[in-house]
Amino acid sequence: MSILIKNVQIVDGEGGEPYPADVLIQKNVISAIGDLKGKDADEVIDGLGDYLVPGFIDVDASSDQYLALITNPAQADFPKQGVTTIIGGHCGASLAPLLYGTLESIRKWVDITQVNVNWHTLEEFFGVVGKLPLGVNFGTLIGHATVRRSINGGAAGALTSSEMKVFLKILRKAMDEGAYGFSTGLGYAHGRLTPYAEIDELTSIIAEYGGVYSTHLRSETSGLIGSVEETIKIANEVGVRTVISHMRPLLGFEAQFDEAVSRIEKNSSPDNLRFYVYPFDTSLNPLYTLLPLWAQEKDFETMLSKIRNPETALRIENDMAGFPFERITFADVPKHEYLVGKTAQDLSAMFGVSPVKAIIKAMDVTSLRAMIFNKNINFEKLSGLLSDDRVLIASNAASRADSYKFLTHERVHSTFPRYLEIVLGHKLLTLPQAIKKITFSPAAYFGLKDRGTVKEGKIADLVILGKDDYRVRKTIVGGQYGRGEALRHAK
C-alpha cells in the first residue's frame, strides 16, 4: 500500500523548524519527502497545511499488565491520541519470560484467568503477539518480579548464588530475544526488600546490551530522597540508562520531591538518568498499597491474613486512621463491579461504619483485587516539570476492552493531547521542542530503531496535527491505519 500526504508542514521530531512538503509512504517506509505533485499513490491525503509529525512514543503503557494487549489488541485509545508505539514491562512485571507459564506478578492489576498462557520465553511471547491485529507497536522490558517470583516463590531476602545464576541466564536470553531492558517495582510488596547488590548485578547485564533500566522507587513519600539516591547510584556505578517510573510530587511530600529532583540534576547526567510523568493529578494504585508498610508483605494471602486477624486488623485500622480517604475512588474491582465508582464515603454509608473500617472491609470483600484512583498529586508542581530536558511523557495506562465495568481515567485517551495543550498553551516549549520530547528523544533513549523522526528511509509512524489546535487528525502506524508490530531491541 502507498500513501501520498500532500500539503503538510513537517515537524521532523529532532527539533527542526516546520517546513512545507509532501510525503510519500511505500509499504511501511517514508520513501520520499519534497514537492511530489507528479507522484501517484493508492491513497492521497490532503493535509491542508496541518502539521505532520512522528508518531508519539508512550514509554510506559500498562496494556500488557492488564492483559489488554491480548484481549483488546486494537488498542484504539492510543492511536486516537497520536501514539504509535508503547513500551510495557514496567514496575517489575512483564508478560514474559515465564518459567512456569503463570502470571502471578500481574494479579495485583487484573484477573489473570482471562488469558490462556501458551508461551514461556520472550521469543514465544513475540510469536503470540505477532499473530494479533495490533493497533500500535509494542516493545517490552523484562519484569524483575515476574522472573524472581518464579525462581524463589516470592521469598524475601537475597537470592542464593544458584538462583542468581539462573536469573542472569534468563535475563541474557531475554535481551538476546529483543527485550528493551529491565524493570523493578521496588515500591511493591514483592520488590521492597530487594537488596541493592541484586539490582546492581542484574542491571550490569542491561548495560552490556545498551538497554534501559526502569524503576518504580522504593518510596515516593518520606523515603523518596533515599530511593532516588539509590537510583542515582545504580545509574552512575553501573552506567545503565535509567528511567524513574511515574515520578510524582505527592501531596504533603513536595519538599522531599523538590530535593530529590535537585539531587538528580546535580549528581547525574540526562544521558543516563531520566524520569517520566503524566500530566494529571491522580494516581492509579492497587488497593493493598493503602495498607501500612508493615502489613504489605509477600502476597495477597499473607496480607489478607493480617486484615482478617482481629489483633492485626485493629493495628491496621489505627495506623490508617489519619489517611485522607476523601481522595479515594474505586476504579476497577473484578467480580465486584458494584464497588466501581464508589468513594470511601460511599462505602462508609453503605456498610454503616467509619471510612477506614469501610476500606478495610472492602479489602476483605475483594480479597485485595481492586484498583483505586488516588487524587494525591500536586498538579501545579508537576506541570512545571513538563519542559524539563530529563522528563519523558507516559500515560501509565491501558487501552482496555469494555468486557466489564471499570472507570477510565482521561490519561487513557488524552495524555499526549493534554501534554501538548499545557506546554504549548503556556509557552513552556515551542512546537518542535514539544514534539521532540515525545518522539525522537524517547526513541533515542530506548533504542527504537528508525522511529521518532520524519525522514526518508524511516518507518512511517506518523501523525497529522491540526495547525490551529494541535489536535490529532490522523494516525498512521507502519504505513497503515492500525497495524502495529512487536518491536525488538537490537544490541
Image (cartoon, rainbow, N blue to C red):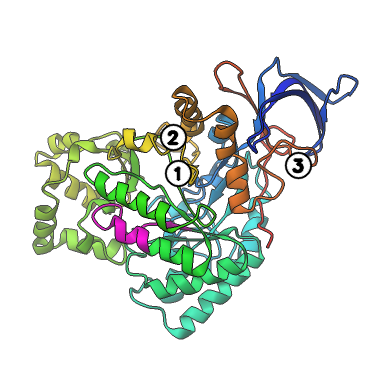
Q: Residues within 10 Å of mark 2 (few under 14, many from 20)?
A: many
- Closest to the observer: 249 or 331? 249
> Is the C terminus in the top left, top right, bottom left or bottom right quadrant?
bottom right
Tell whether position 216 is magenta.
yes
Quadrant in the picture for residue 117: bottom right
Q: Residues within 10 Å of mark 1 (few under 14, many from 20)?
A: many
Q: Residues within 10 Å of mark 3 (few under 14, many from 20)?
A: some
Contact? badges 3 and 2 (CB < 8 Å): no
> Hey, what amino acid is under mark 2?
Arg
> Hey, what amino acid is under mark 3?
Lys
Q: Position of residue 414 (x, y in %)?
A: 47, 30
Q: Secondary structure at mark 1?
A: loop
Drawn side of residue 313 relative to residue 434, left or right: left
Q: Position of residue 161 (x, y in %)?
A: 46, 85
The residue shown at (44%, 27%) is 422
Q: Earlier in the sequence, mark 3 or mark 2?
A: 2
Task: Write down the region rendered in magenta.
Answer: 214-229
- Closest to the observer: 326 or 238? 238
Q: Secondary structure at mark 3?
A: loop
Q: Position of residue 267 (x, y in %)?
A: 42, 58
Please, which residue is most extreme toward the front here?
Answer: 266
Q: Is residue 417 above or below residue 182?
A: above
Q: Which residue is mark 2?
A: 411
- Closest to the observer: 30 or 365? 30
The numbered disc on residue 396 is 1
Contact? badges 1 and 2 (CB < 8 Å): yes
Q: Earlier in the sequence, mark 1 or mark 2?
A: 1
The residue shown at (32%, 69%) is 193
Distance from label 3 to label 1 (Cα)? 27 Å
